[in-house]
Image (cartoon, rainbow, N blue to C red):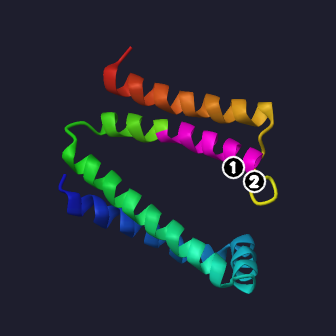
Amino acid sequence: MPFEHYMVFDTFGASLFAIAVPFLPKARLEIRGALRDLGPIKLTWFFANTLTDFIAQVCLKKAFSLSTSAGLVSIITQVQSIYGIIAGLALTLIFPATFHENISIRTLMRKLIGTLVMIGGIYIAFFGI
């Protein structure tokens, strides 16, 4: 499938979800609270985060379009969740006043087991048992 199709389908799916968000009461409450507390520093971080996410999404869709098998790309992208767990742990330990991640052993084990299940499922689907 060409790169353009991936981007169109991904954007269309995200747009459908975005239309439904205002109809969820809890989401409306969270959005109002976030807009009330929005300042220049938060806006800058939001912009940087959104830009980084956009670039990552474009790279991921390009990888899907270039790869002969989506399984290989899926395995690689699931490994990135391990980096997210490590980053959350490190930031919580280094900057506890700023970052509040639940880093209990039980929670970390659940996250790692979930990650391994995803990676294992993709591996089995791609390579078989």
Q: Main secondary structure of the magenta part?
A: helix
Query: Label 2 sits on what residue type?
Result: Phe
* Image side of residue 52 versus residue 128, left or right: right
Relative to 62, say whether 127 is above or below. above
Residue 3 pos. (x, y %): 21, 58
Callout 1 crowding tier (Cα within 10 Å): few <14, some 14–19, many ≥20: some
Residue 34 visible in the shown view? yes
Q: Marks 2 and 1: CB-CB under 8 Å? A: yes
Residue sitting at x 63%, y 31%: 112
- Per the image, the residue denoted by label 2 is 95
Query: Label 1 sits on what residue type?
Result: Leu
Residue sitting at x 73%, y 74%: 30
Relative to 39, say whether 78 is above or below. above
Residue 124 pos. (x, y %): 40, 22
* Image side of residue 112 versus residue 97, left or right: left
The region drawn magenta spans: 80-95
| 92 falls in the magenta region | yes
Callout 2 crowding tier (Cα within 10 Å): few <14, some 14–19, many ≥20: few
- Per the image, the residue denoted by label 1 is 91
Q: Quadrant of the C terminus?
A: top left
Write down the quadrant of residue 87 in the picture: top right
Relative to 18, say whether 121 is above or below. above
Residue 43 pos. (x, y %): 60, 80
Closer to the camera, 120 or 100? 100
| 83 falls in the magenta region | yes
Relative to 122, say whether 41 is above or below. below
Residue sitting at x 47%, y 30%: 119
* Secondary structure found at label 1: helix
C-alpha distance separating marks 2 and 1: 6 Å
Write down the quadrant of residue 109 in the picture: top right
Closer to the camera, 76 or 117? 76
